[in-house]
Amino acid sequence: MRSYYGRQILKTPVWRHDIPAYLFSGGLAAGSALLAAGADLTGRPALRRSGRLTALGAVGASAYLLIHDLGRPERFHHMLRVVKPTSPMSMGSWILAAFGPAAGVAAAAEVTGVAAGLGRAAGLAAAGVAPALATYTAVLLADTAVPSWHEAYPELPFAFAGGALAGAAGAGLLGAGAFSAAAGEVGPARRFALTGAALELAALRRLHTRLGIVGEPYGAGSAGRLLRASRVLTATGVAGAVLGRSRVVSALSGVALLAASALTRFGIFAAGAASTKDPRYTVVPQRERLAARSPSADDERDAVGTGREQLADDRITRDLPGDQQPA
Amino acid sequence: MERMGFFTDTSVCIGCKACEVACKEWNAVPADGLNLLGMSFDNTGQLDANTWRHVAFVEQSSGDDLRWLMSSDVCKHCTHAACLDVCPTGSLVRTQFGTVVVQEDICNGCGYCVPACPYGVIDQRPGDGRAWKCTLCYDRIGDGLMPACATACPTESIQYGPLDELRERAARRVERLHASGVSEARLYGHDPADGVGGDGAFFLLLDEPEVYGLPPDPVVTTRDLPKMWRRAGIAALAMAAAVVASFAGGAR
C-alpha cells in the first residue's frame, strides 16, 4: 500500500476521556431508568428506588462530561439551537433534554415521597426515551469517517444496548446490597445482566469477525486489552449475578458488570481512534471498494502505469519503517 | 449565486508555499511552531486548525532518477459535506457560493466535525477550542476578490473561479497532458458522482491520491446514516423487549 510517508489521512477524534465515560454513563442512565420503571410497575419499590437514583446520578454525570469535553463549555446551550436529524449529536442533545428532567422528577418524587403519581409518570417518560438514549451513541460514533466505527454501524447499537442493560443490572445488584429490602427484588436485574451481556458479547464478536481489516483495531493494542478485560469481567459478573445468592456476591457481581460496561466503551473508543492513525485502514478498504466497482478500470491503470508508478512503489517500500511495510 | 471553487493543478506547483503564507497572513491564522519533520521539504505535515493550505512534497527516487511531486492541499468544500451534516449547533453552514464555512461565534467546540471529515481537514484549535478550516476566503470573494492563496500563487497552480468553468478547464488540461505523454495525470474530486458529490476544491494529480495523503475513494459518512438510524431503532426495540421479558420472566 502507498501513502504519504506513512502519515495518517484522517484526523483522530479530539474527544477526551469524557466521551467514552459518557458512553458508559449515558447507557447506565438509560438502563437504570428502564429497570426503575419496570420495578415501579411490578411492585418492587427498593429496586425502583435504586434505579431512579442511579438514573439521575448517571444522567447528571453525563451532562457534566459532555459539557466538560466541549472546546467552549460556556456555549453548551448552542446544542439546542437547531434540531438536526443528520447530526446524531443534535438528536442526542434533545434526547438528553427530554430524559434528564424526567429522570430528575422521578428521582425527586422517590426521595421526597411526594407526588408519587407524577414520579411514576416521569419515570415512565424517562423509560420511554431510554432505549433511544442507550443506542443513539452508537450512531454518534458510526456517523464519522473513522473506519473502525463507521463500518461497525450494524453491530454497535446492539453492543451499546446490551452494555446499558448489563451496566444497569450491575448498579441494581449493587443497590440491592445497599438497600436490604431490595434483596428479594433483584430477579429482573439478574435477567438484565444475562440478556444484556449476551447481546453485547454477541454484537462485539460479530463485529470483530465480520469487519476484516478495520476489525483489527478491536483486537490490538490498548483497545484489545480493554475489550479482553471487559469480556472477563462480564463473564464473571453474569456468573455471579445468576448463580450468587448472597448479598455480597450480588454486589461484587454488580461491580464487575459496571466495570465491564465501562471498559467496553473505552475499548470501542480506543479502537476507533487507533484506526484513524494508520493510513492502511483508510486506503486499503477504499482501494478494495474501487477495485470491486470497476476491475477493468484498475487493470487499465496498471497497464498505462509507466516506469514512474513502479519507481514510486519502490521508493515508498524502501522508505517506510519496518512496521509500515506493505504486506 | 454561482458555485465557486478551486482547481489546484499540481503539475505546475513549484512548492514555494506562498499559498500557505498568504492564507495565514490574510486569515490571521496563528503560527503553529517551527517543526522539522525530517521527511522531505514539507515541514507543515498536514492540514489542521492552523494550516488551511498545505503543500505536500513527495520525493520519488529510483537510483539516480528523482522526481518531486508538489501539491497544495486545501479543504475540499464537498457537495455533500460530512462536517456540515454532523455539526449539532448549525455553526457549519453552506454559503451562497456553495462553500462550507464555520461560524466562529456559534461553534462550541464539540469536535464532531473533526472525525467526520473523510479528508482529515477540519480540526479543533488548541487553546481556542473551536473548529477551524479554510473558508475559501469568504470575506474576500464576497467583495469580488480572489482567495489569498490563489492570488499569491505564482504559477497559477491554484485557480479560483466558478466551479463549472474550472471543471471544463481541468478536463482540457488533462487532455493536453495526456497528449504530451504525461499519462499519469488524473483529476481528483472533480466527479459529481463520487462519494462526496464532487469537491468544490478539486485537483489534478500526477500519481495516486494516497501518495499525496488523500483518500482514494472518500465517502460522506452520512450517506449511510438512514441505515444507521434503522439499526439503532431495531436495537432500541430489542432492548425494550429484553426489559419486558426480564420483568415478565418470573417473581424473583
Image (cartoon, rainbow, N blue to C red):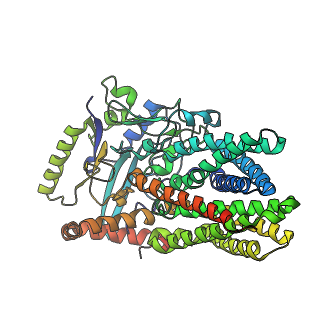
Front residue of this view, candidates A45 and B58: A45
The answer to whether any part of residue A145 appears in the image is: no
- Where is residue B172 drawn, in percent x and y? 15, 47
Q: Identify the image quadrant of the C terminus of chain B.
A: bottom right
Q: Residue furthest right?
A: A180
Residue A213: % across, % down: 45, 71
Q: Is residue A45 left or right of residue B244?
A: right
Tell me: B1 left or right of B230.
left
Asked whether B43 or A54 is in front, the reply is A54
Q: Position of residue B146 (x, y in %)?
A: 31, 30
Residue at 76 percent across and 45 percent down: it is A107
Q: Residue at x 70, y 59 (%)?
A: A168
Image quadrant where residue A221 sits = bottom right
**Side of B175 relative to B112 (left or right):** left
Task: Using the image, determine if residue B96 lies above or below residue B79.
Answer: above
Q: Which of the 4 image quadrants contains residue A176?
A: bottom right
At a point 62% along the width and 39% down the height, the residue shown is: B127
Q: Tell me what residue is drawn at x 33 percent, y 22 percent.
A: B143
Left or right for B100, reference A310: right
Image coordinates for residue A271, horizontal then vertical, percent:
56, 64
